[in-house]
Image: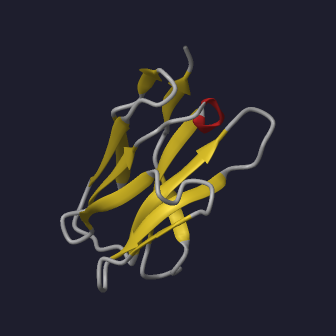
Amino acid sequence: VQLVESGGGLVQPGGSLRLACAASGGVFSFNAMGWYRQTPGRNREFVGGITSTDATAYYAHYVKGRFTVSGDTVKNIVYLQMNNLEPQDTAVYYCVAASPESGAYDIWGQGTQVTVSS
């Protein structure tokens, strides 16, 4: 299975971007899908996710109120709408999926760069 992200790029502070992620490569189902991000010299950090059971979205405190995770885990598609972006949101954003076997986010995309700068 592959997760492919799209939608990254350069945006000014206060601007918006929408990332998309689609899974391909077979027939599968995930427990959840979501997003992590990583900046140079730092560990990857959780951004937000959405469960497949009831489509509940949950977020890290540093993006809550600005970012929205949505999608359809049955169709294996997830989005990340990012509003009011700040320079500290600059990072490589990774799409992730939780397989039923592990229950944890164990499938990762290649990542897409988001740069917030004037």
Residue 33 or residue 67, whichever sits in front: 67
Percent position of residue 18, x then y = 33, 40
Percent position of residue 49, x then y = 45, 66
Query: Based on the displayed image, in which of its 4 quarters is residue 78 positioned?
Result: bottom left
Which residue is located at x 49 percent, y 38 percent? 111
Residue 20 or residue 58, whichever sits in front: 58
Which residue is located at x 62 percent, y 55 percent? 62
Q: How many marks?
A: 0
User: Residue furthest toward the right?
Assistant: 41
Which residue is located at x 34 percent, y 32 percent? 7
Percent position of residue 109, x then y = 46, 47
Looking at the rendered image, the quarter that the C terminus falls into is top right
From where the camera sits, is residue 97 visible?
A: no
Horizontal relation, residue 30 to residue 108: left or right: left
From where the camera sits, is residue 103 visible?
A: yes
Percent position of residue 37, x then y = 59, 46
Looking at the rendered image, the quarter that the N terminus falls into is bottom left
Q: Where 38 falls versus 65 (above or below)?
A: above
Q: Where 85 falls versus 95 (above or below)?
A: above
